[in-house]
Image (spheres, rainbow, N blue to C red):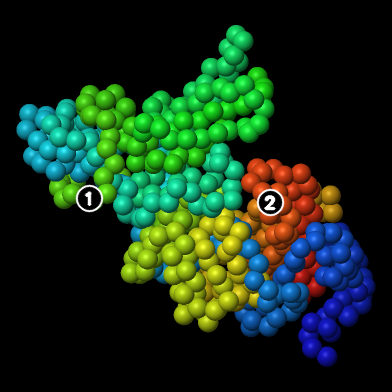
Amino acid sequence: MDRRRFLGGTAGCLIGAAGLVSPALVRAQTVQVRAGSDLIRTAQLGGDVGYLVADLRSGLVLEEHNARKALPPASTAKAITSLYALEALGAGYRFVTRVIATGPISGGVLQGDLILAGGADATLSTDDLGAMAARLAATGLRRITGRFQVWGGAIPYAEEIATDQPIHVGYNPAISGMILNYNRVHFEWRRAGNGYDLAMDARGESHRPRAYTASAALANRRDPLFTYRQQGGKEQWTVAAARLGKGGSRWLPVRQPELYAGDVFQTLARAQGVDLPAPQPVRNLAGGTVLVSHASEALPGILRDMMKYSTNLTAEAVGMTASAARGANPALGRSGAAMSDWLAARAGIRGAKFVDHSGLNVQTRVSAADMVHALRVVGAPMGLRGLMKGFSLRDDQGRTIKNHPIRVDAKTGTLNFVSTLAGYLTARDGTELVFAIFTGDVARRARAKNAEAPEGAGEWVKRSKILQSRLVERWGLLYG
């Protein structure tokens, strides 16, 4: 009889022999007598459920279900992207945005072009550009004789990360080497008389410049909520007036990031007394003198925030930058394939198929077994757990269980009718396990088409997350 069957068959006896026990162990008795298959049936998810849990130190597989089937990992793919970027770029890597002069400056006048050169820094904010504009003014520059250019060629452009998302969701913007505010623009509406006041801005904490490259107009309809088109160098949105209520705001995706960032920098620079013409995107970066630069924080901090807030654009930017550093094709799709090849060479995992670095594309596929292997043999030595967010277990009603004795650090992943969890757990006695749980009803997701919140998706995800908590709790109490 192997260890899994032995422990599973004797769990009730082990706890029953403990005498006086804590409330957590009283709860454990109920959790452990329910097999994983019973928990899956209770969740009533449909589609596929795959999971695997192993001892972190030895690699011994303790429990698994459908663990070899490749399923959409959703945002747990960001864990692999983190490892890929750390190995390719190094923990000291910083993304740098520069302002470059192509000619000499005399009497406050630049005889040549000024270039805002993006460095694929997904964390660049309006406030960062404001600080750069102030430092540019401090050099004495007041105007230029040439053009104001914006370069975003540090990584290849893509209009969006995934094609099956609603047009207006801010987590699916364009990809470019020039990134500002995660390539999102802030849209706000307020009741005004018989209509609404609409505003588009690039707000930060200290600056709130108007975004002249984006506009919004009311439409007398209920559906669709938004429409979008590009015309005359502007991103033009219409919004259904019947859906706006009294007022509100949301971030909309930007599809022309070079124009957007250039527009904002022009406004901020003019506020500092530096007169710049309208921005012009350029394909090739000219040489010159760097007048001002802004460096991001070091890569581990960026990855930690990416894992915490699950920012898709950050994942794509760091993954594509890593591919470029390795000499691979960094274009969207091709860069994901390069990460798949890296994982095969690095950990012997040949069944994973990455279409992107964020997991937003549902065509990305990884099995629970491969994810656990990667987290154990690559992630653990590289300190991946330290980049992950603490995960709170939930009760059967979905409420957070406070002060639970099992400590979990993991990456979550959520799409409509896809919910995943992968990471590390420490049991009461200090035993460390590594696990992955993938749930997904891809057919039901496809039927929902491009809806932002299709009927039943919220309740489905809630049941999946409860299942994940029950499984993790079972493992932590059973194998600790």
Residue drawn at x 65%, y 19% as measured from the top left: 246
- Residues under labels 1 and 2: Cα distance? 40 Å
Dot 1 corresponds to which residue? Answer: 285
Side (left or right) of 199 relative to 296: right
Percent position of residue 135, x then y = 24, 35
- Label 1: element kind: loop
Q: Secondary structure at mark 2?
A: loop
Foreground of the two, 190 or 17? 190
Residue 284: give x, y in percent of width and height: 23, 51
139 above or below 40? above
Going 70% across and 81% down the picture, which residue do you hit? Answer: 61
Q: Earlier in the sequence, mark 1 or mark 2?
A: 1
Indicate the position of residue 129 as horizontal and vertical percent values.
34, 37
Image quarter of residue 291: top left
Q: Amino acid at mark 2?
A: Asn
In the rendered structure, the answer to whether residue 416 lies left or right of residue 101 reads right
Asked whether the viewer can see residue 220, the reply is yes
**Of 212 and 326, the residue lying toward us:** 212
Q: Which residue is mark 2?
A: 416
**Is residue 130 visible in the rendered structure shown here?**
no
For the residue marked with disc 1, what is the amino acid?
A: Leu
Label 1 environment density (alpha carbons within 10 Å; few <14, some 14–19, many ≥20): some
Name the residue located 23 percent from the left edge and 29 percent from the top edge.
Answer: 277
Query: For residue 55, which numbered disc appears in the image?
Result: none
